[in-house]
Image: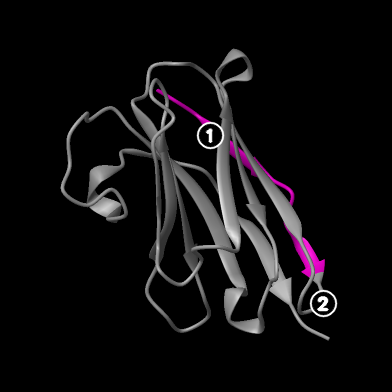
């Protein structure tokens, strides 16, 4: 069973930055995605990166502000979040998939392994 552990969440002022990390216990995944859930809202996909190719996908709401990257030697994926807004507040989860093809990489059903989540709060 692949295990994922997120870290790096916290409280930040609007306009600030945070970097989240997702450490996987093994390397047998095709891609890792980041999702978030705001209070009272459904969980939504934020970004995804394929392990081998490094190809990335972003939700429109974070394009130009967030950057996903990977360190395959450490089985770790990072989410650099800049120009944070109050609406970015929520619990951020990383998830892994072993599937190698999808029309939409930011849907929950594609992912079989999930981390426990890390809280991100953007507030002044």
Q: Is residue 43 left or right of residue 17?
A: left
Neighbour tally class for label 2: few under 14, some 14-19, many 20 plus, Cα within 10 Å: some
The residue at which mark 2 appears reads as 13
Give percent across and percent down for residue 25.
54, 21
For residue 11, above or below residue 103: below
Looking at the rendered image, the disc whose residue lies closer to the viewer, 2 or 1, is 2
Give percent across and percent down for residue 33.
42, 45
The stretch of residues the image draws in magenta is: 1-11
Neighbour tally class for label 1: few under 14, some 14-19, many 20 plus, Cα within 10 Å: many
3 in the magenta segment: yes
Q: Is residue 117 visible?
A: no
Which quadrant: the C terminus? bottom right
For residue 19, above or below residue 123: above
Q: Is residue 62 left or right of residue 118?
A: left
> Residue at horizontal 66%, vertical 79%?
85
How far apart marks 2 and 1 lie (CA) works out to 27 Å
> Residue at horizontal 44%, vertical 52%?
47
Which quadrant: the N terminus? top left
For residue 123, above or below residue 72: below
Disc number placed over residue 4 in the picture, else none: 1
């Amino acid at each position: 069973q692949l295990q994922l552990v997120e870290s790096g969440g916290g409280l930040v002022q609007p306009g600030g930055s945070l970097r989240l990390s997702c450490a996987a216990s093994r390397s047998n995944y095709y891609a890792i995605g980041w999702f978030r859930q705001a209070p009272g809202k459904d969980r939504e996909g934020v970004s995804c990166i394929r392990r081998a190719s490094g190809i990335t996908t972003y939700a429109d709401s974070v394009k130009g502000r967030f950057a996903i990257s990977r360190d395959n030697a450490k089985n770790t994926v990072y989410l650099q979040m800049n120009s944070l807004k109050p609406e970015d507040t929520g619990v951020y989860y990383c998830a892994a998939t072993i599937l190698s093809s999808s029309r939409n990489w930011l849907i929950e059903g594609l992912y079989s392994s999930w981390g426990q989540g890390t809280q991100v709060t953007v507030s002044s």
